[in-house]
Image (cartoon, rainbow, N blue to C red):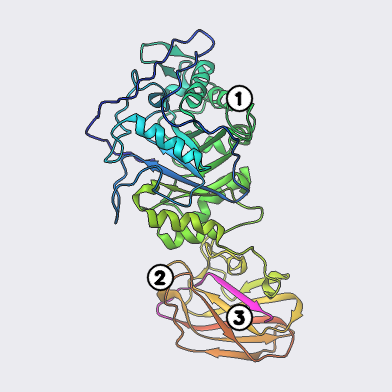
């Protein structure tokens, strides 16, 4: 998750004592001081509506000042406390990473108070837990006084810390030198006894994690035997294509188990919003913003977009009622083929390495089209269509021109423009014949609709 080291360590003021553990169990930690812990049960959001924001203590704000856990976003329903360790929140005397300080937080007491404030507002609050190379050994954790914990003791210790602090679960950060072996899997599964869908509290103690294809042993979580213990997985390969990284996990885990993470530093707001608005069938788990306290406007816009899209499928859109979309040229990059033009998702696009060419829809049932829309794609305005005709046919050979447009421009990315036509004839084939793009030899469009109204 890309951390930056802090240079100052502020003395910790909250005193909470950690008692010794037995050979098989971890003794309870003392409850921290602060607001009363939420007592009512709060379950995961509805399918597709998980809006996760990470709060990173060392994040450098962009275009704003430093913000706290309680005000860095208004749109998240799941907050992940990132950096530092879970055990230093539970025992501020014997553990201190030095990470959980910034201009807002000078001591752990304030962190603990704000966690409970969030929970009192109905937010789900998780603590980030980094894996480590030691997780692949028989002793994944060693306490402050040198006591080595096996995987059962360590998992129990983590659960005790969560209960002591007053949290709703944990979120793994997997990228720290561990290897996928029996020791590692034993710990992941043991944590699943306390957190997640297979735990003793499957609706109220959350277990998730952030992974990416290049960070071992992250790819191992594509295995359903491991991922079944998690509520969902979050991809943190921010620098990769959104659709490709989502499909990397969804191919084995299914859409409902997967969400992409977004970062202010790597993902433009327009592309992140577009992906957040995308609701495949079945729906994805939601969307995550890493270091959401870098820029509140960005974070709020991305998370808010999860609920601002319309449900895919428009009874007035002929392309949603059955049929086949084809193109004159089939030289599209992987993931940008012609089918993306009518998939109801602005997070995808059709691209051809030709500056002109036609796209065509053959409807299962002929229909009278009264208007059509074209939506610009995510980048490079020069690739937008500029001049075109819309044509209709009932045999795919003889064509009638229904509309002609010249010198068209799209002022912004993901802009949908509607063109009304005078047509009273029912056609089975509709063809958009683009004769020129703005400039260059590449053409792209995000969406094309054929409307009966």
Residue under the point 53% across and 63% down: 348
Q: Is residue 439 magenta?
A: yes
* Residue 345 picture quarter: bottom right
Under circle 3, the secondary element is strand
Q: Which residue is mark 2?
A: 380
> Around disc 2, counting alpha carbons within 10 Å, would you say few (fewer than 14), some (14 to 19), or many (20 or more)?
few
Under circle 1, the secondary element is loop
> Around disc 3, counting alpha carbons within 10 Å, would you say few (fewer than 14), some (14 to 19), or many (20 or more)?
some
Which of pointers 1 and 3 lies earlier in the amino acid sequence? 1
The quadrant the N terminus occupies is top left
Residue 292 has which mark?
Answer: none
Residues at circles 2 and 1 in contact by the CB criterion of under 8 Å: no
Q: Which residue is mark 3?
A: 372
Q: Which residue is mark 1?
A: 193
Which of pointers 2 and 1 lies earlier in the amino acid sequence? 1
Over which residues does the magenta segment extend? 438-453
The quadrant the C terminus occupies is bottom right
Q: Residue furthest right?
A: 365
């Amino acid at each position: 998750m890309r951390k930056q080291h802090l240079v100052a360590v502020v003395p910790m003021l909250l005193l909470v004592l950690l008692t010794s553990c037995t050979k098989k169990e971890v003794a309870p930690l003392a409850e921290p001081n602060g607001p009363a812990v939420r007592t009512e049960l709060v379950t995961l959001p509805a399918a597709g509506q998980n809006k996760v924001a990470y709060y990173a203590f060392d994040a450098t704000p962009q275009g704003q000042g430093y913000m706290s856990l309680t005000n860095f976003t208004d749109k998240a329903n799941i907050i992940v406390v990132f950096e530092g360790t879970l055990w230093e929140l539970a025992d501020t005397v014997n553990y201190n990473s030095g990470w959980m300080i910034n201009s807002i937080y000078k001591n752990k007491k304030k962190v603990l108070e704000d966690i409970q404030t969030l929970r009192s507002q109905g937010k789900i609050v998780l603590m980030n837990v980094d894996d480590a190379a030691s997780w692949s050994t028989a002793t994944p954790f060693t306490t402050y006084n040198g006591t080595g914990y096996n995987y059962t003791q360590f998992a129990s210790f983590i659960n005790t810390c969560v209960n002591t602090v007053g949290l709703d679960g944990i979120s793994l950060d997997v990228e720290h030198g561990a290897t996928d072996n029996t020791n590692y899997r034993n710990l992941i599964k043991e944590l699943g006894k306390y957190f997640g869908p297979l735990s003793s509290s499957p609706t109220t103690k959350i277990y998730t994690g952030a992974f990416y294809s290049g960070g071992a042993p992250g790819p191992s979580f594509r295995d359903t035997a491991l991922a079944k213990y998690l509520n969902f997985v979050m991809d943190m390969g921010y620098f990769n294509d959104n659709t490709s990284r989502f499909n990397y996990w969804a191919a084995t885990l299914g859409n409902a188990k997967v969400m992409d993470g977004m970062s202010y530093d790597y993902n433009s707001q327009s592309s992140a919003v577009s992906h957040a608005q995308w609701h495949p069938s079945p729906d994805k788990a939601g969307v995550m913003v890493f270091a959401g306290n870098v820029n509140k406007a960005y974070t709020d816009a991305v998370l808010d977009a999860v609920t601002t899209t319309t449900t895919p499928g428009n009874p007035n859109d002929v392309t949603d009622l059955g049929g086949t979309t084809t193109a004159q040229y089939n030289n599209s990059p992987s993931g940008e083929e012609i089918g993306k033009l009518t998939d109801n998702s602005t997070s995808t696009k059709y691209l051809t390495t030709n500056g002109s060419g036609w796209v065509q829809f053959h409807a299962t049932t002929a229909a009278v089209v009264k208007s059509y829309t074209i939506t610009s794609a995510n980048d490079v305005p020069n690739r937008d269509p500029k001049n075109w005709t819309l044509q209709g046919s009932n045999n795919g050979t003889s064509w009638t021109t229904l509309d002609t447009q010249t010198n068209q421009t799209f002022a912004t990315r993901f802009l949908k423009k509607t063109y009304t036509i005078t047509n009273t004839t029912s056609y089975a084939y509709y063809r958009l014949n683009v004769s020129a793009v703005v400039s260059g030899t590449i053409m792209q469009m995000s969406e094309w609709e054929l409307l009966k109204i």
